[in-house]
Image (cartoon, rainbow, N blue to C red):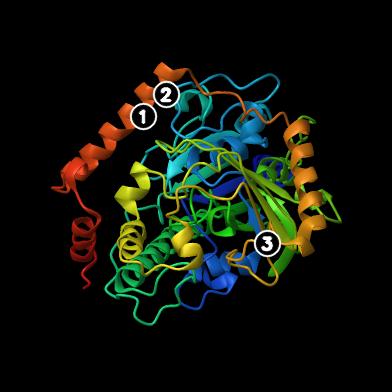
Amino acid sequence: MKKWFLLLLGLTTSVWAAEKPNVLWIVADDLGIELGCYGDKEVDTPNIDRLAERGTMYTKAFASAPVCSASRTAFITGMYQTSVGGFHHRTRLIKPLPDPVKPVTEFFRDAGYWVSISKDDGKAGKYGKTDYNFEYETEEMFDGPDYGDRAEGQPFFHQVQIFEPHRTFKKSEEKGENLTIPPFYPDHPVIRADWANYLHTIEILDEKVGVVLDRLEEEGLADNTIIVFFGDHGRPHLRGKQWLYDAGIQVPLIVANPLSETAGQKDDRLVNLIDVAPTSLSLAGLSVPGYMQGKAIYTIDGPVHPDGIFAARDRCGDAPDRIRCVRTEDFKYIRNFHPELSYSQHSGYKKLQYPALTLMAVMNEQGRLKGRQAEWFADSRPAEELYDLKADPNELNNLADDPKYAETKADLSARLDEWIKETGDQGAEPEGDEDYMKALMDEKWEAFARGMKRRGLDAENLSERAYLNWWKKELGVE
């Protein structure tokens, strides 16, 4: 009798597990599509590549925002950050989510899941990055930092938050002499060394992904765990992070579901990171709330977003702005609501972290920049941008004023207007009064000045050329 009871108990546990698969998100911080499985031959990512071989790789996945907190607010709720009021990066005005919006964690918990979030593989016992622009308490939102602490047989929804390849990069022994540099950047040793460090840091990310995958295998969980791997937004480089060009919003997205026959597939449809929450719920057999703006990708045969991908950039730290875009298969339309601002307006984060910005500022002073590079340092920018993505994937040739593309621009502009209206984009509302904004900007400047002081530099009295010399020494180049 005892033998039969144990057998029955085992079968019951097995059926429960089959009915409720584990769901694991692996989220990389500031990751573009510079991965082996996405065709980059200059970076070695065997663990992420093997994950792609086990699942479906989305070749046209995009974040709804090009910066951490806004994007994370969106993908944890399945809603555009502009619809729920969580779009300014590093705002002081943190509010509750509007009814009936909830983080996806609550729906998993209601279904009996252990809900957890960790740095790396979780065994260190530290909560991972959240960074949401709404009111929450990490210890209330999550049951703990390690899915290993759940009850026996309990399914889990776990997030592994990996810091890499966020700056500051880990230093590579290589200086990038033989690497392919994106065409917007000058071909200069500073750029090459920085790019080499970025790719090296991605390889460290890949090693950490390998640890996560190996743990699942070792604990016998791999066959019942759906893995969703993605970056929170695009690469942390000039014209990438904090901008709506593809470099800033395109991300890898891989869904490996051992319970389906999707191994090694590619999906070229346009998808948005707001789709990750509803897709995860759907794959786990749970209901998707009707209010979610994201789509359960696997339930749709045709285009997931037939009108295109929409994304938004608002204030990022000490750089106020409002930019919106719509991206289709063939074109991208960008609307700059503040054309009076320079592309290169002061940003403490970028000034502290992007050597390309200082290098190009010096080259601009010397008259060595042309075209779009020089335009980056102009006092203003176009109100509209339009790019033919088939002919110009790097988005360097703005066609907004070309009469041949007037119809295309009008169509995409109308789509953007409709999206702003339909989704209740709150970006036109002022963040705060004049006193609030002044205090905020003063706070950001002081933080920037402290960061420079830690480097032995005076933010108030530092020339671009002197700062470039600091970067050269830091990167080990001339």
Q: Is residue 232 above or below residue 69?
A: below
Q: Which residue is mark 3?
A: 399
Residue 155 visible in the current orientation: no
Q: Are marks 2 and 3 in contact (CB under 8 Å)?
A: no
SS category of the residue bearing label 3: loop
Task: State which tag comes first along the sequence, 2 or 3.
Answer: 3
Disc 3 crowd rating (10 Å Cα; few below 14, some 14-19, many 20+) is some
Q: Left or right: 69 with respect to 264? A: left
When asked about the image quadrant of residue 286, the answer is: top right
Kind of residue indicated by mark 2: Met
The x and y percentages for residue 83 are 67, 30
Disc 1 crowd rating (10 Å Cα; few below 14, some 14-19, many 20+) is some
Q: Left or right: 254 with respect to 408? A: left
The x and y percentages for residue 344 are 42, 50
Q: Which residue is mark 1?
A: 441
Q: Which residue is mark 2?
A: 437
Q: Are marks 2 and 1 in contact (CB under 8 Å)?
A: yes
Q: Residue at x 38, y 67 (%)?
A: 195
Q: Residue at x 50, y 23 (%)?
A: 136
